Image: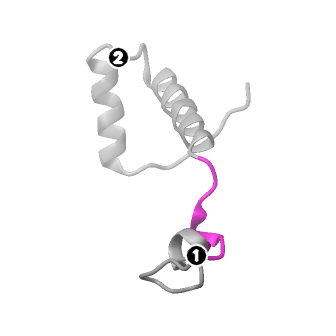
Amino acid sequence: MPKVEITIPEHLEMQIAQMVEQGEFLNREEAIEDLLSTGLKAYKTSGPSDEDEEPGFEEDGMMGHDDEYVF
């Protein structure tokens, strides 16, 4: 398994240590691996951001008007 070295803020390290102390994980390495894996799955399933897309009918109305739809 590849090894990765990261630097994280103190408050995250404290949260991870607390989860290990509470028995949610066996050790720090397991906690980081599981939390990273869960985060990647959540990121992957959230789909791409719509911010880069051009405005469509839903945002600008059928004829480009913000407040009315023309049929």
Residue at the extreme front: 71
Vertical side of 67 occupied by 28: above or below: above
Kindly report the secondary structure that dominates the magenta region of the rendered protein: loop
In the rendered image, which quarter is residue 63 located in?
bottom right
In the rendered image, which quarter is residue 26 located in?
top left
Vertical side of 65 occupied by 15: above or below: above
Asked whether 11 or 34 is in front, the reply is 34
Query: Closer to the N terminus: mark 1 or mark 2?
Result: 2
Q: CA distance from mark 1 to mark 2?
A: 57 Å
Asked whether 12 or 62 is in front, the reply is 62
Quarter of the C terminus within the rendering: bottom right
Q: Residue at x 55, y 80 (%)?
A: 70
15 with respect to 25 (left or right) = left
The x and y percentages for residue 1 are 73, 24
Q: Is residue 29 visible?
A: yes
Vertical side of 48 occupied by 60: above or below: below
The x and y percentages for residue 61 are 53, 77
Q: Is residue 5 visible?
A: no
Query: In the rendered structure, which amino acid carries the disc numbered 1?
Result: Phe
Q: Residue at x 62, y 48 (%)?
A: 47
Vertical side of 38 occupied by 56: above or below: below
Asked whether 56 or 39 is in front, the reply is 56
Q: Residue at x 33, y 48 (%)?
A: 10
Asked whether 65 or 15 is in front, the reply is 65
Query: In the rendered structure, which amino acid carries the disc numbered 2?
Result: Glu
Q: Which residues are magenta?
A: 47-56
Q: Which residue is mark 2?
A: 24
Q: Which residue is mark 1?
A: 71
Question: Circle 1: is it few (<14), some (14-19), or many (20+) Cα within 10 Å?
Answer: few
